[in-house]
Image: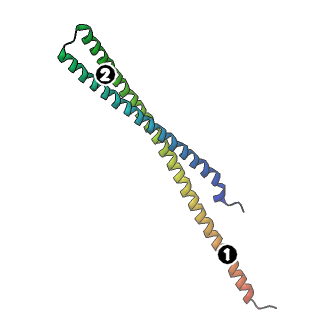
Amino acid sequence: MNKRSRRFQPIQRLARHGEDQAIQQLGLAQTALSDQEQRLLDLISYRDEYAQQFHQSGKSGLDGRQLQSYQSFLNQLSLAIEQQKLKISQAQQHCDERRHDWQQRHQHSEALDSAVKRIRTQEQRIERRQEQRNSDEHTMRAHKPSR
């Protein structure tokens, strides 16, 4: 007999596969976000080191060209930091979208699992009733006087 619960198995497998893919995509998005955050920290650290070097050089005296060069490079680093912050914002948004996708797929998978569990419970109940009926009929036949 092709039980109803067995007919749900392919659907469950597809749902689990979709959930697995969604969790992989979330992991990749989280890794990308972490990488972008590390790049920001590296840029900030580099800018701070360069600014400190600028101040040290300033104590010993800088000509106009050197001063302009330092300031220009610091401005470029500051711009790169702001751009990196935008990249982080985009990576965070992508990560949030992947998390939402996974949560939806997970809920769908859980709902399917729950439905199949209820169906299996019903099937088992029906099987037990049928077995009881068969047993009762067998007992009645065994105790029935022959004619």
Residue at image x 26%, y 11%?
Answer: 66
From the top left corner, tell me how far across and down residue 5 is, in percent. 63, 59
Q: Which amino acid type corresponds to the residue marked 2 in the rendered image?
A: Ser
Determine the residue located farthest toward the left in the rendered image: 59
- Element at label 1: helix
- Residue tagged by mark 2? 78
Q: Residues within 10 Å of mark 2 (few under 14, many from 20)?
A: some
From the top left corner, tell me how far across and down residue 18 is, in percent. 56, 45
Q: In the image, which disc is placed on residue 73?
A: none
Q: Which amino acid type corresponds to the residue marked 1 in the rendered image?
A: Glu
- Element at label 2: helix
- Residue tagged by mark 1? 131
Horizontally, is 101 left or right of 139 in the view? left
Horizontally, is 1 left or right of 106 in the view? right
Q: Which image quadrant: the C terminus?
A: bottom right
| Viewer-proximal residue among 47 and 126 | 47
